[in-house]
Amino acid sequence: MNVKRTFGTILTVLGIAGLLYTGYLLMQKSEAYTNMAVVGVIGLIFFFAGIGLVQNTKDES
């Protein structure tokens, strides 16, 4: 079991969850713009970091 690949998958899933939550807040026309911006940016960072970890980790079986 590759720890980097697993951690990358977890980061990707957390990023997707953050982006979905941001989309939900946008659809509800929430006035918490600071909250939306923070969650959206952190979601993007997690998503792209997770994708990068999964892509750049070699399988060594």
Image (tube, helix red, strand yellow):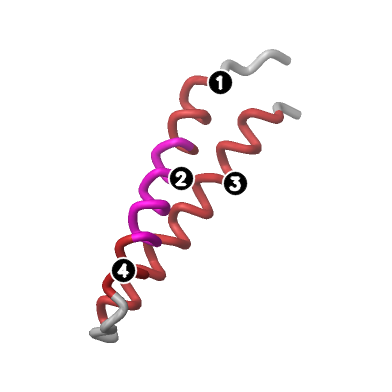
Of callouts 1 and 2, the N-terminal one? 2
The N terminus lies in quadrant: top right
Which image quadrant is residue 3 in? top right
Circle on res. 46 = 2
Of callouts 2 and 3, the N-terminal one? 3
- Is residue 6 part of the magenta span, yes or no? no
Q: Which residues are magenta?
A: 38-49
Q: Nearer the viewer, residue 5 or 42?
A: 42
Do the residues bearing badges 4 and 3 touch, measured as CB atoms within 8 Å? no
Circle on res. 57 = 1
Q: Nearer the viewer, residue 44 or 9?
A: 44
Cα separation, mark 1 vs mark 3, equals 14 Å
Q: Amino acid at mark 2?
A: Phe
Residue 29, position in %: x, y? 23, 84
Residue 28, position in %: x, y? 29, 86
Of callouts 2 and 4, the N-terminal one? 4
How packed is label 4: few (under 14 Cα within 10 Å), some, or many (20 or more)?
A: few
Disc 1 secondary structure class: loop
> Viewer-nearest of labels 2 and 4?
4
x 58%, y 16%: residue? 58
Q: How many marks?
A: 4
Cα separation, mark 2 vs mark 4, equals 18 Å
**What residue is disc 4 on?**
34
Of callouts 1 and 4, the N-terminal one? 4
Cα separation, mark 2 vs mark 3, equals 9 Å
Q: Is residue 7 above or below residue 34?
A: above
> Viewer-nearest of labels 2 and 3?
2
- Is residue 40 part of the magenta span, yes or no? yes
Do the residues bearing badges 1 and 3 touch, measured as CB atoms within 8 Å? no
**What residue is disc 3 on?**
10
